[in-house]
Each structure stands twice: as structure tokens, then as C-alpha cells.
Amino acid sequence: MNSNRPVVRFAPSPNGELHLGHAYSALFTEARAKALGARLLVRIEDIDLVRSRQEYVDGIFEDLAWLGLEWELPVRRQSEHFGDYRDALARLDLRGVLYPCFATRQQIRDAVADAPDHPLDPDGAPLYPGLSKGMPAVERDALMAAGTPYAMRLDMELAMEIAGRLTFEEHECRPIGTVHADPAQWGDVIVARKDVKTSYHLSVVVDDALQGVSHVTRGQDLFHSTHIHRLLQVLLDLPQPQYYHHDLVRDYGGRRLSKSARDKSLRALRENGTTARDIRRQLGFT
């Protein structure tokens, strides 16, 4: 194996069946791999231990094989590597950029309920109003000793002061070229959830570095997440990949396809007589 070859990855979450949007992302990644002469990896992002199910993992492999993709083995499953994320979290803590957050979602909503102009993050959620930030050590230690659940948040102001100017290279989504990263738009983002002590942001950054991913391919819905990822990469001294944020598959009304909306799965399409060639032709990957 040539370790100097570029590396791309398709990284689905096994919390539902794959649909046409996932097929587009997988085929887009395959096309990038061929264009770059890159190694193609599949990664199972299953840190959500409640919603992830083995039947969905099996379905992912079945769907991808049906589409004609070939990928390297073994496949990395995030649920088998929580130690890597704990190590990264410890490194961030040593830099002094983390603090525990004991606030519940309801408490956060209540705190901003009377502030209609309170800023929102790119996902439309209110920016964290700092309920636990600056908490006295005595109070914090008492809550921890009592077993009160807490997340770990990034002190965004301090983290950006340490990281300095941040950029990333975008090759697909507008604007193409060098993008100025602005992670402050997310506020003091969670980097370790209360339940699993990691997050999508932390896990994906660690995984991409450990797997040598040089070119990240994913949907435009994750474009703004890249701003956080660049910050974490700098704070953790990790390499910087190049990014390709592709278009999203939408229905006739302009809504992007999603598992939560129960859009027709690849399995259902296959069982109804649709062929992999039909899917490739429909999505423009003939």
C-alpha cells in the first residue's frame, strides 16, 4: 500500500437506512477517489449508542456494495475508539480551553426565552448563554461529586485567541478557494456530550487525522461545521485536509432528504426493482 496516496472517506451514521442523499455522497466520494487516485475508506460514525443499530450497519455495507463501491478493510467504527476521543479531550483540557456545562436544554431555552434577538448558530439553535461558564470551583466540584451530568464546552474566545487566523481550502461549495474560518458563529460549542463524552466535531477530527484522510467529502449541510473542525485541528496539532462540500439531494419541494422524514431508502428502491445503474444515472454518476 502506498502511504503517500490521498485518502477519502464515506462516513455514515447507522441510525437509519441510507437514502438517495447518502447514495449521492457515497458516489461523489468514489468519484473523488478515482480523480485523485486516492484510497477509499468507509467509517461507521456510531457514537450515538442509543440510536445506532447493528442492522443499520449491515444495511450500509449491503447498500454500498449494491451501488458498486469498493473500500478498504477493516472499517473503523467510532464506538470502538472512545479512548482516542478521551485522549484528545484531555489534550484540549490541558490547553485550558474547556469547561463543564451542567445546563439542560430546557434551562438554555428558558434563559433566552425573553431575548428575541438572541443570536443563533448556523443550525438555528440559540447560542449558549454561558450559564455554567465562570462557575466557582467549589460549586462545580460539588455538582461533579453529586454525579450531576455535564457536557464539556469549548471556551470559544480563548480557543480562537490561541489558534489565531484560521482558513481551509474548499473545492466544491461556494466560495471555492481559501475560506476564512469563523468558528465563533457557533459560540461555546459542545465538544463532549453528557452521555458519551465526545461529540461529532471532536470524533470526526480525530478520526480523519488517525486515518490519514487528506480530502474530506461531505454535504453542504456540514460546511459550517468545518469552521469548528479547523479550530480543533489547530488546537490538537492535527493535519489540515482539503474539503469538498457537495450539493444535497432534495425532493420536488426543495426539502433535503433525511432519515427523520422517512424518505424512501435504498433498500426499498432496490426491492421495488430499481437497479444500481438506475441510481447512478439518476444522480449523475454514470
Image (cartoon, rainbow, N blue to C red):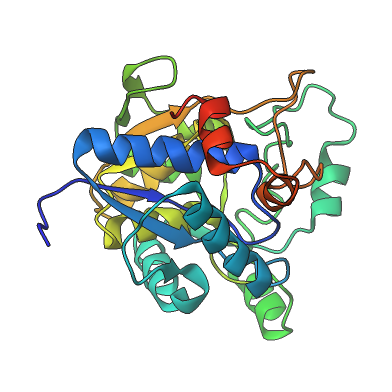
Q: Is residue 212 left or right of residue 218?
A: left
Q: Nearer the viewer, residue 251 or 11?
A: 251
Q: From where the camera sits, is residue 47 visible?
A: no
The answer to which image quadrant residue 97 occupies is bottom left
Residue at figure coordinates x 64%, y 50% from the top left: 18
Question: Is residue 286 placed above or below 203 in the rendered structure?
Answer: above
Residue 122 image position (x, y, % from top left): 62, 30
Tell which residue pokes out farthest to the top in this image. Answer: 175
Question: Is residue 138 placed above or below 179 in the rendered structure?
Answer: below
Q: Is residue 123 left or right of residue 68?
A: right
Residue at figure coordinates x 67%, y 85% from the top left: 145
Residue 57 image position (x, y, % from top left): 59, 67
Residue 139 image position (x, y, % from top left): 69, 71
Question: Is residue 253 placed above or below 223 in the rendered structure?
Answer: above
Q: From where the camera sits, is residue 93 visible?
A: yes
Question: Is residue 20 placed above or below 73 in the rendered structure?
Answer: above
